[in-house]
Image (tube, grey):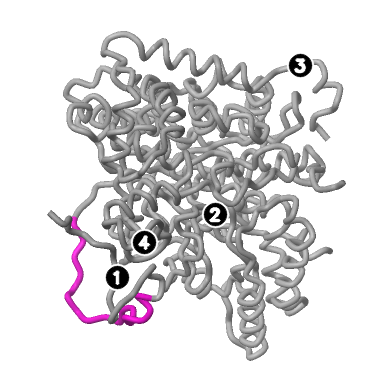
């Protein structure tokens, strides 16, 4: 057996936290120059949450805003790559449109399609009011 | 031999010779789940009744003399991201709690057609976003090597189920490493097939240009058997590749690397990597060389930017994909008391139904795609994606496969990174490049890190549609390592022995 022994383990104290901190510091330091590392504000996060249709609480906003700021600072590293003239890739394999013959095929029954709906009325999805009163 | 300790290949042979029935095999695994899953929490749903019904059907067909597929009667655990008809499918999220899909994912269908027994649905990070299963709305799974450690993620329940002998095989999905990272930290085998090689139809979408279903097993051959069973063109998935399935099972049986050119990626090493991970990786490379492979070092200069590019691309796609959870047609609906309009109900539902990481990523993606930031973030990330693909192309011009550690560290402690998203994201440092490029990659155990006695994974990466090369290399390494250790690595896992 060439697996570990407890003696081997004891001698070399090493923590994951050290690794993580080292990598993270590299990420933030490298991200800092060139483009403005725009700190994202609490108000901006609130606006993005509204766009995303998530009714965040104040406590969540307080918690999320600094985290997002940290993440955005780290991912901003992509801006330091010399990419002039490099075409973007949206998809790893060459995508072409896929067609099929327009033939009737079996599909879900109305009952099956509606079976998981939060509310149903007259064989339709029943949804809350969509248009405002004014 | 105990049925739960047998490999899928051994079970398949014993079932074919009618030495054991599918019902006995299924019951043995259900018993094992009942005995250990309160500690491992690999499963969100154990499908005892339907599994036994499926097993009885397989037994009946075999008795009638029908020729059955290799996996007929072999249990498979399925990640809860795959739609399973009339069986709960939650994706680890409160927003889908109680949802019973009215249809099967293509892979679910293929498993059923092959006679594989769907034994249950496994735990995962919510919507496959995470590296530890701690983002599951239903509590984390635990690593069978040490119950205080994470099993990896997002397919952590699938990996833990296989490592804890609750199922010989499992299915997961890999978007940034969600199969290979849990396989590595649980000491088992896991493959991300070529993108488009396995169908996404009926897989709840996270990042559609990256999501790739794939297999887990305790051996390389088992993993290949499942890979073959689930792969192949699917007209229901417009990004499915219409090409023959690479000969993965034959490659796993050959297990020969003599004359193969293997490239060690210089950028996936060095600072920030756990020393014991690097030493086990170095041993694996020496081993492959001793088996006749030609090893060289290869530089992929843009791999350092894969992680930031991924954390722009994946959240951007997620912010769009998860817009479907709108409380109108299925899933949770909150606050619909007659006074609120649809938009308010939607926002309240998503607030209550999504967990913190999902909200973080939706907001991050919304930011990266918003006008004014699009070019600086999403656009730039897409250019980096091109450069990473070019790095791979250049590398595969020189070598047949690339190798690296599968993860920078072994399994970390539960709770250790939950409030530090960037630290959590680093778990996928080595696996992300293959997702961005859409090629194939595997993680196979290569020993235990001396510092903590936890498993280390060797990652092998191959060009798109050359998935068979992964199995050739992984099987050769597995055979040589097992010979050296005197037993499979997993035999030394003691987390459930108390």
| In the rendered image, the vertical position of residue B121 relative to residue B272, given as above or below | below
Residue drawn 20% across the image and 79% down it: A103
Please give the range of residues in magenta. Answer: A97-114
| In the rendered image, the vertical position of residue A10 relative to residue A123, given as above or below | above
Marked residue chain, label 2: B
User: Percent from the top left, x then y, of residue B330?
Assistant: 38, 65
Front disc: 3 or 1: 1
Residue drawn 70% across the image and 70% down it: B13
In depth, the one of B254 and B437 nearer the eye is B437
User: Percent from the top left, x then y, of residue B466?
Assistant: 43, 47
Which of the 4 image quarters holds residue B435? Answer: top left
Marked residue chain, label 3: A
Q: Which residue is mark 3?
A: A12
Q: Is residue A87 left or right of residue B134?
A: left
- Calculate the distance from the C-alpha at mark 4 to the C-alpha at mark 2: 44 Å
Which of the 4 image quarters holds residue A121? Answer: bottom left
Q: Which residue is mark 1?
A: A126
Q: Which residue is mark 2?
A: B215
- Calculate the distance from the C-alpha at mark 1 to the C-alpha at mark 2: 40 Å
Front disc: 4 or 3: 4
Front disc: 1 or 2: 1
Q: Which residue is mark 4?
A: B337
Determine if the magenta segment contains residue B435. no
């Amino acid at each position: 057996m060439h697996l570990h022994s407890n003696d081997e383990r004891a001698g070399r104290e090493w923590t994951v936290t050290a690794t993580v901190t080292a990598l993270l510091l590299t990420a933030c330091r490298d991200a800092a120059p060139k483009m403005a590392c725009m700190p994202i504000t609490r108000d901006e996060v609130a606006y993005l949450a509204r766009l995303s249709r998530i009714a965040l609480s104040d406590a969540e906003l307080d918690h999320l805003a600094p985290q997002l700021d940290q993440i955005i600072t780290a991912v901003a590293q992509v801006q330091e790559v010399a990419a002039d003239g490099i075409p973007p890739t949206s998809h790893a394999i060459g995508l072409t449109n896929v067609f099929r013959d327009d033939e009737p095929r079996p599909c879900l029954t109305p009952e099956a399609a509606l079976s998981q709906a939060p509310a149903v009325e007259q064989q339709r999805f029943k949804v809350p009011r969509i248009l405002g009163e004014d | 031999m105990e049925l739960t300790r047998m490999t899928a290949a051994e079970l398949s042979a014993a079932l074919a010779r009618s030495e054991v029935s599918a019902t006995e095999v299924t019951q043995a695994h259900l018993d094992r789940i009942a005995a250990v899953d309160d500690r491992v929490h690999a499963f969100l749903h154990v499908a005892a009744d339907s599994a036994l019904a499926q097993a009885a059907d397989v037994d009946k067909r075999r008795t009638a003399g029908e020729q059955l597929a290799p996996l007929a009667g072999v249990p498979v655990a399925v990640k809860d991201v795959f739609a399973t008809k009339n069986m709960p499918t939650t994706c680890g999220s409160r927003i889908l709690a109680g949802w019973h899909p009215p249809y099967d994912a293509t892979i679910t269908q293929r498993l059923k057609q092959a006679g594989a027994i769907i034994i249950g649905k496994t735990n995962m990070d919510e919507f496959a976003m995470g590296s530890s299963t701690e983002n599951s709305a239903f509590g984390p799974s635990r690593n069978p090597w040490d119950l205080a450690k994470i099993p990896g993620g997002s397919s952590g329940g699938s990996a833990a189920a296989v490592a804890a002998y609750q199922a010989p095989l499992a299915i997961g999905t890999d978007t940034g490493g969600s199969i290979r990272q849990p396989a590595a930290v649980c000491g088992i085998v896991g493959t991300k097939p070529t993108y488009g090689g396995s169908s996404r139809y009926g897989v709840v979408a996270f990042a559609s240009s990256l999501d790739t279903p794939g297999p887990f097993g305790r051996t390389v051959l088992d993993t290949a058997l499942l890979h073959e069973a689930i792969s192949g063109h699917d007209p229901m998935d417009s990004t499915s590749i219409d090409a023959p399935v690479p000969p993965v099972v034959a490659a796993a049986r050959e297990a020969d690397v003599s004359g193969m050119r293997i490239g060690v990626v210089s950028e996936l090493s060095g600072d920030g990597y756990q020393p014991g991970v690097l030493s086990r990786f170095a041993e694996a490379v020496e081993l492959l060389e001793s088996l006749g492979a030609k090893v060289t070092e290869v530089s992929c200069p843009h791999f350092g930017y894969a992680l930031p590019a991924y954390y722009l691309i994946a959240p951007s796609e997620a912010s769009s994909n998860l817009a479907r959870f709108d409380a109108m047609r299925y899933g949770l609906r909150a606050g619909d008391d007659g006074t609120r309009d649809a938009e308010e109900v939607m926002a309240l539902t998503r607030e209550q139904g999504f967990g913190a990481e999902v909200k973080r990523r939706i907001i991050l993606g919304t930011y990266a795609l918003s006008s004014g930031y699009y070019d600086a973030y999403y656009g730039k990330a897409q250019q980096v994606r091109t450069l990473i693909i070019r790095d791979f192309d250049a590398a595969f011009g020189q070598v047949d496969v690339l190798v690296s550690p599968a993860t920078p560290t072994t399994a970390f402690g539960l709770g250790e990174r939950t409030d530090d998203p960037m630290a959590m994201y680093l778990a996928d440092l080595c696996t992300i490049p293959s997702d961005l490029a859409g090629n194939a990659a595997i993680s196979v155990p290569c020993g235990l890190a001396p510092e903590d006695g936890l498993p280390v994974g060797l990652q092998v990466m191959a060009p798109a549609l050359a998935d068979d090369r992964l199995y050739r290399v992984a099987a050769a390494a597995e055979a040589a390592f097992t010979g050296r250790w005197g037993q499979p690595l997993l035999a030394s896992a003691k987390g459930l022995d108390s």
